Amino acid sequence: MRYSQGGGLTDAERAARERVRLQAVACFQSGEKNREIAAALRVSERSVERWRRQWREDGHAGVASKGPPGRPRLSDAQMARLERELERGPLTHGWTDQRWTLARVKTLIGRLFHVSYTVEGTWRLLRRNGWSWQQPARRAIERDDHAVELWKREVAAGKSTAAANGAWVVFEDEAGQSMTPPRARTWGRRGSTPVVRVRGRGSGRVSMAGMTCYKSGQRSRLIYAIRECRGRKNEPKGFDWKDYRDLVLRAHAQLGGPIVLVWDNLRMHLVAPLREFFEANAHWLTVFQLPTYAPDLNPQEGIWSLVKRDISNLAAADLGQVTRAVKRKLKMLQYRPEVIDGCLAGTGLTLSV
């Protein structure tokens, strides 16, 4: 039998309780009655009855405590099997991506051994057996901070001018995703880098263009466009200047007011037709270019980070599965204005004018 959660006892107290059980077994062998044993050992008659029944069925082993159930342990053979299954990857066990989380490892242990671990217990088990939570290294790109400060002042002046007209501040950016998924942290054996296995078949790319839209006193908005490119003949490989023009027009129609557009120096953003479009619509559209190497000033980058995190280690069967995963995440973010606000806060920029 087991003490509930260890009975709330220390090891010494548990050993003392074991001695009481052994004394009860000695009384059973001498033929004493349950009432007499309970009075002598100062326990309930029901406990004595239960001990006697277990003693008759299994002898001393039936009466001995099996320890607290709150701290399950896997044998060496079970742990070796668990490690083999972890090395096969989550995809083999039914998950769509290849990221081992504590919750997934906990579920796998239950499936394999019918043992219930807590998330914290799973963390201790993995750490004790040489597994760690690993993340790729990153290297920052150096930039001209003086140019960034000048840009911030310029944008602040532009926002002040447009604020009187009730303008929205709109940050635009692009991203893409191929069949090769982004890498994310996963549990792996310490000293051995985990390997993410991707499908070799299929090609193509999902192009994304998004706008995070902010205005004081208004709910933040997310507007996006998605295009699939499967590498077919004469198929566009991404967005052209007309697509960006249409996206700006769609934002203007949905937001219902003037726009201060902030985006980077992508070559397609600087073509002559777009400049002519900006000049023709200067009464409601003001455009600012981001400084070079300054993605951290664009809150739309935070949106892409959330999307990429959601599809990280995804072993997609085809490009359509990638597109559906991207659309699902972007649609969810449209209903989370607090998350969109958090992306702006992460840049250090404000809407104060």
Image (cartoon, rainbow, N blue to C red):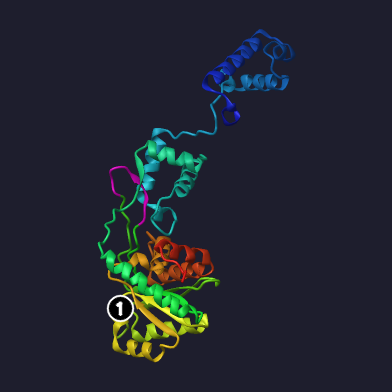
Query: Circle 1 sits in a helix, a strand or a loop, which is it?
Result: loop
Where in the figure is residue 99, as x and y percent of width and height?
39, 54
Residue at horizontal 70%, vertical 12%?
37
Q: Which residues are magenta?
A: 184-193
Where in the figure is residue 295, as x and y percent of width and height?
33, 67
Residue tagged 1 = 231
Query: Total label count?
Result: 1
Q: Is residue 240 left or right of residue 75?
A: left
Where in the figure is residue 342, as x and y percent of width and height?
47, 62
**In front of the other: 66 or 7:** 7
**In front of the other: 219 or 174:** 219
Where in the figure is residue 66, as x and y percent of width and height?
54, 26
The question of residue 192 being in magenta is answered with yes
Residue at horizontal 32%, vertical 65%?
180
**In front of the other: 30 or 229:** 229
Q: Residue furthest right?
A: 35
Q: Residues within 10 Å of mark 1 (few under 14, many from 20)?
A: few
Q: Residue furthest top?
A: 30
* Quadrant position of residue 217: bottom right
- In the rendered structure, which amino acid carries the disc numbered 1? Gly
**In front of the other: 190 or 280:** 280
